[in-house]
Image (cartoon, helix red, strand yellow):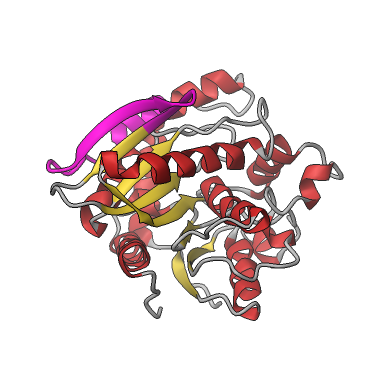
Amino acid sequence: MTSQPFDAETRLHLEAEARSAGPWDPDWPLARQRQTWEEHCKRTRARRPDRIMVEDMVVAGLHLRVYRPPGEEPKPGVLYAHGGGWTMGSCETHDDLCAELADEAGVVVVGFDYRLAPEHRNPAQVEDALMVLDWMKSAGRAIGIDPTHVIAAGDSAGGQVAAGLALAIKYAGGPRLRGLVLINPALGGDTETASYREHATSPALSRDEMIDCLEALLGPPGSPGWSDPLGVPNVAQDVTGLPPAFITVAAHDPLHDDGVIFAQKLEAAGVPVALREEPALAHSYWRSRHHSRAAMAGFRAIVDAVRHLAHEGALQPY
């Protein structure tokens, strides 16, 4: 795609966020990095819509957070996998996003704290997603979910978890999800793509940072994880039968080409797919949605995709 200059409103927001976050050192112990980001996200996240009901619970040792719109009738469910490079992130860091998706798309969103790398490498994250999905389908009606209307969604690393989940279901011969929503997804192990090279020092995610995250998930280059489609969905040889997918990518993002490659794979396999490209935005642009008109337009497209896939099992053209 032909990118536009980086959105000025988003840039101003990112600069303000950096000032608010305070000192950050990538050489800090990982535990300190995780805690610092959690605390920053709690301070700066948007307020939840008042009418959304939120419940925390523990299922099979995993912390889950369920976001329910009002109403007695069962609603479609969204399994949401958070981003954070597989090494950090939680329900807390993505609380406002999940709450707004539930409110605006009329769905029950289930966020979950999957096991993090490098302590737990691929496929631990997909295994956790499978467990949560099984719980949503078996206990769904008790928490307001129609278990026949469940989609998976995720941003960045969470996009890999959602796509890996869909592939794991395919390989096991189980009933497929109703849809996939992948937001700036990390789906490939090739860090020499044009977008990785052109946007190596992107304002929201750098190539070096992403390489560190991939090695945390998959092990050193050449390890078996790099050829496992569950961890690297773009190496999958057969994607037939995957659910309809909405994929959104940003022009100023090293991961731009990851999403494009996966969309092309799905299209070639006859899987319905809608690819939306944001020409003026960068990685995790949704975090700037309340500060940037371009980012809010991108977020509205995500909401529309969740609504249509979850309720109707259909894609809107983009």
Please state the horizontal and vertical placement of residue 24, each as a whole percent of the image: 51, 27
Q: Residue 310 placed where, x, y %?
A: 35, 62
Task: Tally the numbered discs.
Answer: 0
Residue 290 lies within the magenta run? no
Q: Is residue 262 visible to the viewer in this orientation of the structure?
A: yes
Q: Residue at x 77, y 36 (%)?
A: 219
Q: Residue at x 42, y 56 (%)?
A: 151
The N terminus appears in which quarter of the rendering?
bottom right
Is residue 12 visible in this depiction of the protein?
no
| Quarter of the C terminus within the rendering | bottom left
- What residue lies at 60% left-to-right and 78% top-to-bottom? 267
Task: Place residue 242 in its image quadrant.
Answer: bottom right
* Drawn side of residue 224 relative to residue 298, left or right: right
Residue range highlighted in magenta: 38-64
The image shows residue 221, relative to residue 259, as above or below, that is above
Image quarter of residue 241: bottom right
84 lies left or right of 112: right
The residue nearer to you, when weighing 292 against 85, is: 85
Is residue 44 shown left or right of residue 35? left
Relative vertical location of residue 218 with respect to residue 203 in this rendering, above or below: above
Q: Is residue 242 left or right of residue 190?
A: left
Q: Nearer the viewer, residue 204 or 61?
A: 61
Farthest-out residue, right: 222
Q: How far across and how far down the image is residue 32, in percent?
A: 53, 19
Residue beneath the point at 81% across and 38% down? 220
- Residue 253 sits above or below residue 83 on the image: below
Whether residue 62 appears in magenta in the rendering, the answer is: yes
Q: Position of residue 216 (x, y in %)?
A: 70, 35
